[in-house]
Amino acid sequence: MSSTRRDFLKTSGMLVVGIGSGITSLSAQAPGRAASTGTGPYPDVDFRQLDSWIVIRENNTATFHVGKTDCGQGTGTAFRQMMADELDMAYNQTACIMGTTDITVDQGGSGGSDAIQTDGIPMRRVAAEARRVLLDMASKQFGVPVDQLAVSEGVITVRSDASKRVTYGQLVGGKKFNVVLTGNTVDGTTGVARVKAVQDLKIVGTSPERYDIPGKVDGSLKWAVDMKVPGMVHARNVRPPLAGAKLLSVDESSVRNLPGFIKVIRSGNYLAVVCEREEQAINAARALKANWEKPATAPFPSSEDLYKFMRAATPTSAARPTVTGNPEAAFASAAKVIEAEYEVPFQGHTALGPAHAMADPSNGQMTIYTNDMKSYGMRTNVADFLGMPRDQVRVVWMEGPQAYGRTAADDAGFEAAYIAKEIGRPVRMQWMRNEETAWDTKGPAFTVKSRGALDAEGNLLAFDFEARAADYNHLGYNEPDTVLIAQLMGRRRATPAGGGAATPNEMYAIANRRMSTAVVSLPLVWETPLRTGNLRDPNGPQATFASESFIDELAAAAKADPVDFRLKLLTASTTDDSGFKRARSIATVKAAAEAFGWDKRPSPKGRGTGNLLTGRGIAYCFRSQTVVAQIAEVEVNRRTGHVWVKRLVVAHDCGLVINPEGVKRTIEGGTMHSVSRALHEEVKFDTEKVTSVDWLSHPSMTHLDAPARIDVVIVNGDPNPRRADLPAYGAGETVCKPTLAAIANAIFDATGVRLRRVPFRDDRVLAALKAAGV
Amino acid sequence: MSNVTLKVNGKTHTLDIDPATPLLYILRNDLDLRGPRFGCGLGQCGACTVIINGTATRSCMTPVSSVRNEVTTLEGIGKDGALHPLQKAWIEEQVPQCGFCQNGQIMTAKALLDKNKNPSDMEIREGMARTLCRCMTYYRIQAAIKRAAKVMA
């Protein structure tokens, strides 16, 4: 390590967290770095070195270096629980460093709610391996076999002679393990040791408080927004006033004499201004005069005409339909055919804090301080974007306002780095609110056509589901040719990364099915504020809104209880081999109904005479191996159209639960996010620009919408619930999927009116009630 | 630029600054406080909330020249090194997901409880209605406010 780099790290505000044992002054560097492939200061971290993952200190504490980021669900706390448990240390003897590319292995950062499910497994294995190695060292020291040793809280004792004891810190504190691990990929990383049986885990399954919360409530935590270095300056973007507009000229004299002015940055249609102080940059960005050419054709239809446009469009791609049985024959023989169409708008990520990052170009390297959830891909791609060697670039992940997929397109990080390189000074980039709401990545709009066939007894014979998504240019993971600055600079792929639509995830046994998806494009493909990205289960809420609303429509047509109708579809005999997931689906639906106190009857309920109509609705789905059933109880005001989701029950099976209180809150948060999407959220635009620019024009749920009660039921529906290898599945995004349908189904139960277009805003609900004579 | 005197969390500062500058940027950039944060700059979300003269105030919309009284930020509501009962309740309820908005939630709740020691559920909902959380932790925030109100009673 060169002295230059050491000095640099000293000022760089490295995030180290620890509680209980007072681990506060750990060195920032993990010892297990790979042999440098170049001359840069930031070589890749070698995941096949135990030292890359675990550092034991002389004071008998451990620091875990993991390649994940915590989006506010407490995964860092869960990682410490899992690794401390395998290592036989107390939770309070451990700390965790996450997501900084030069000192943690590349586990990809966050995404897909799979932190525990996928990335937790190698963490457990390396912790188990560290324990094995330490016991081996103690065995040699005491001259007794390992099976005659006991270990607890990082202290190894000889069973027959408790006076013979040694701590992990005494064995390896301040030194390297120098143990090589195996595995072709980081997910496959393993040592020789095996992980513990579930029954032997002591910290897993308990709920230590999240270590990050105290610093978040007393103002002491340093977030990415707080990152400062000496000489840092402030940048603000100037966006095209119309989508697809071309920048013709910039009048620098309009800002040159403003206080603190440093520079106008322009490349293609990308425009920004840099000033010494933050408020100066804001003022300069507002004052900068630029000429923009209006595009010759409209970039998109207005949001009012979106669905008409999507239905009429020729798909840019379509997946081959999945067909089972003979749907057409079943429809031909049906006693009753039900058809319905559903619509979900573009919905914004709209993080509470707009995009931001700070980039420091000192000493020829580049460090980006950001809340980028996928810091590793960011590092590779920003190096590509800047034309710098990878080992001269690092990304330091810090806490930020989470937007559930937004920071997988780290626009501000790229912009800060680009400007920092241009001017040779550390730059803080901060988007403004109107910019974030209009130009952030959006969850794609959907239209779905559904058709169902019932026989004379109300049995479901056939289900036809046809989804279309406006997801033509999908931003995934900080690609250097799809982040907004790259698009505006004219750096583009030959073909955009098409996203996809989605079909429902349920385990219903329906003999005849046809499931199809297609993607449609809006006219403006690049440089568009309607860029799509991964919004908390990217397509699940849209598809599940349609499918679980439609199952409810079929149940109503069959005059069946909505829970019974679903259980009948789940318990029907099948020839497929998915009994495992089906058994867990049945357990979860039943658990939700029981916790709610579900009264068996068909919907709708039959309206009362008062102003407030109440009803309940259920929806269920899975994602990967996580199963969720939600029941919403709503109150609909027939005079105003206002819907209050008064009560929610969420039954959730994610297998092994690491931190029950943490999982509960994650489930609450995800569910409430979808309550907001169901009731409020819709990106509005005219044929020139996005007109949703703040919290009034893209409203979100508020305190007034909070339910009076939420019950989370943790289910373990595994056919062998006490198995020693019970897997942990993801918690988070799955719960975002069924909520929209559960609410729509509850509104139907209360009013007899079926809402097939999201969101269920007061005016829209009132119009539907009036049209139905309610 | 001109000299502006500002009292924040018990300390007086004199700064050579454009008096039109929103208080938020001075708290964050000149006084290095991390509690109040930029969320919208429009007074719509509450992330920047501080307390001035007992009132929850949106510092993003408050020119520093208009500040006449002491400013209290999230860092200044505890006493003698101990957390404020609201902060304790926030930890006990494990309220935050990402936590970015929680400055605004806690400061707005403090101003609310300082005026109304025992608010009803509806008074809490209405008093907090303009303070947004995009992790939608409202349910837990309301539980934490009730918990703190009991302790403070």
Image (cartoon, coloured by chain):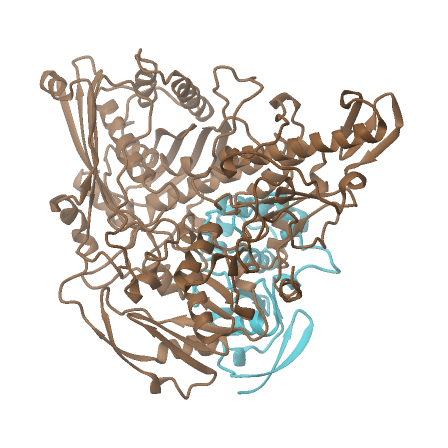
Q: Is residue A144 above or below residue A658?
A: above
Q: Please name the color used to draw chain B.
A: cyan
Can I make out residue B36 in this image?
Answer: no
Instruction: Tell me which corner region of the image, top left, top right, bottom left or bottom right, holds residue A180.
Output: top right
Residue for point 58% across, 19% down: A724
Q: Please name the color used to draw chain A.
A: brown
Residue for point 42% across, 67% down: A418
Q: Nearer the viewer, residue A531 or B80?
A: A531
Q: Position of residue A33 (x, y in %)?
A: 60, 49
Quick one: quadrant of the N terminus of chain A? bottom right
Instruction: Tell me which corner region of the image, top left, top right, bottom left or bottom right, holds residue A660.
Output: top right
Q: Position of residue A264 (x, y in %)?
A: 38, 78
Q: Position of residue A408 (x, y in %)?
A: 41, 51
Residue for point 30% across, 65% down: A488
Instruction: Tell me which corner region of the image, top left, top right, bottom left or bottom right, holds residue A699.
Output: bottom left
Q: Viewed as shown, does residue A227 lie left or right of A357? A: right
Disc tally is 0
Can I make out residue A58 in this image?
Answer: yes
Q: Viewed as shown, does residue B7 lie left or right of B19? A: right
Q: Is residue B95 above or below residue A467?
A: below
Q: Position of residue A67 (x, y in %)?
A: 54, 45
Q: Nearer the viewer, residue A615 or A199?
A: A199
Q: Nearer the viewer, residue B153 or B15?
A: B15
Quick one: quadrant of the C terminus of chain A? top left
Q: Nearer the viewer, residue A231 or A683?
A: A231
